[in-house]
Image (cartoon, rainbow, N blue to C red):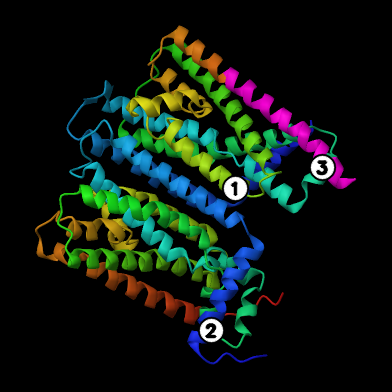
Amino acid sequence: MKKIKWWPEFFRIVFKMNIKATINYFGWNVITENVINAGVYALEYILIWATMSKFTSMNGWNVYEVTFIYSLCLLSYALGNIFIRPFWYFDDLIVKGGLDDYLIRPVNPLAHLLTREWQFNYLGHFIIGIPVLAYVMGRIDVFWSSSKIFMLVLTIIGGAFIQAAIVVIPSCTAFWIVRSSSIASMLRGFREVINYPVSIYPKFIQILFTFILPYAMVNYYPSLTLLNKSTDAIFSIMPYITLFLGVVLLVIAYLIWNKGLKSYNSSGS
Amino acid sequence: MGYIYYFTMRLRTVVKYKTDTIFRIIRALISFFTQIYLWKALYGSNQVVAGVTIAEMMTYVVVSRFIGSVTSIRLSRDIEDRVKSGEIATDLIRPMDIRLLFASRSIGDSLASLLLDGIPVILFCIIYLGGIMAPATIQHFALFLVSTVMAIIVNISLELLIGTMAFWYMNAGKLNMFVYSLSALFSGGVVPLWFLPSWLGSIAYALPLQAIKFIPLQIYLGRVSIAGSIESIAVQAAWALGLMLIQSLLWSKILKKIVLFGG
């Protein structure tokens, strides 16, 4: 077997592998999937607009601002989930022993897992999400300086980290509790809460989604900064906190992964 | 009766997974909070918007949850799975109409979701909100129940039709996701059709999706007269028949195609 020495070479190989696999297995399906994904999210945007059409504001947020919030959630979700698809069914890998394949290869198992199944069908999310975001940014009464745009990009990257960690951390519990996909998919489903500003909910839900399951850090709090919604000093640096939290959560995910891997005994099949 | 066997089998499979059930209930509760507080935030200090009171809107959310639970079935995905795995071939040689088999399974789905994440969540909602509005009149309530049964039938016909597409387009799951999003917008399950801008509203009224959620809801709230309710139920019946007719046409074509492949 050829030994892979350099990370750049590794990434070149997996990139080619992913493209080839996608085209071989799915072919034209990739295009139809992306078209359908774009259609699905176009309908979601229309739904927000239709819901608000007879109302002037949602707790002080107008339709463009709500759409802005929704877009941050959508884009960070798509970005965060491109590489981590194997974690969606991670307990299957444990139960059926599929994880063993990753452990016997001459490359770090995590790096291999993350490069195994890239989701090219998330392209549809960007095709619809980016233009809508750009449109509503023009409609919101905020001056988009280059530092604001920089903070926006950081917010989306940080949000992607947070959303990825919310998938990976519960999935890794499969090392100990074996079946983890139903709790993981429930937590992923809670994303619907941040389709709207979390300030509309009662306090206990706000606390739950800020401190315990920090979805609100993906879009609501950074938007307070980006859209000049608050004059409090703490709310002027939220995008950086989002990014920081995202990195911290990914580090925690990595530590849990390592710990799990150490205690892993193959099912043997 | 073989169909009853399939129905109870499905019910038992769903009930068996207890932790999944707990997660389903939590998910449904969170989803309920999202809906309730979305409308509360939109209404703000207004009591009436576009002729709809906030009390009516809260009732709408709860009753919509009820109809949502009896119409949440996985029939089209069932067919897709069996087409992909090839098990559909064994289904077709069974001495029963396989479409009725799928339909009886999906009634098992409906009942399971009504018992597991329907009724508990609805009771919780009613207590949390401190009560909801009663149906407009007793006649309206009777018609609401009839209309709910019709909604279930329309829903099954629609899912059968989507599932049938799996024979051509293998990724019917994706198609299903698209129909699901269409339904969020046009069925009235999330936004009552009164609130839609007029052009979107007219599209919604021309689609079968409103027959699954909006028609029974409107009858419950007494937004239509008794005569109007009966008319709406007739619309549901027409959709059910129409969808079944299209499905049958496609189905007979498929059976020929399968014989060719299997020959």
In the rendered image, which quarter is residue A242 located in?
bottom left
Task: Tell me which chain the residue with mark 1 is part of.
Answer: B
- Marks 2 and 1 sit apart, C-alpha to C-alpha, by 34 Å
Would you call the spot at circle 1 few (<14 residues within 10 Å), some (14-19), or many (20 or more)?
Answer: many
- The residue that label 3 is drawn on is B258
- Using the rendered view, name the quadrant where residue A58 is placed: top left
Mark 1, residue position: B173
Tell me where the magenta segment starts and ends, as one range. B237-263
Q: CA distance from mark 3 to mark 1?
A: 21 Å
- Given the current orientation, which residue lies at the most extreme top position? B227
Image point (29%, 40%), residue name:
B37
Does residue B4 show up?
A: no
Numbered label attached to residue B20: none
Total labels drawn: 3
Q: Amino acid at mark 3?
A: Ile
For the point 42% across and 54% down, which residue is it? A127
* B258 within the magenta span: yes
Tell me which chain the residue with mark 2 is part of.
A
Asked if residue B156 is positioned above or below residue A125 in the image, the reply reads above
Crowd class of label 3 (few under 14; some 14 to 19; many from 20; radius 10 Å): few
Task: Tell which of B1 and A48 is nearer to you.
Answer: A48
Label 2 SS: helix
Q: Residue at x 19, y 29 (%)?
A: B46
Q: Main secondary structure of the magenta part?
A: helix
**Where residue A228 sits in the image (x, y, percent)?**
14, 56
Front residue (pair B159, A19): A19
Q: Secondary structure at mark 3?
A: helix
Q: Which residue is mark 2?
A: A10
Residues at marks 3 and 2, CA–CA distance in whole angstroms: 45 Å
- Could you tell me if the residues under marks 3 and 1 are in contact, i.e. CB atoms within 8 Å? no
Quarter the N terminus of chain B occupies = top right
Q: Amino acid at mark 2?
A: Phe
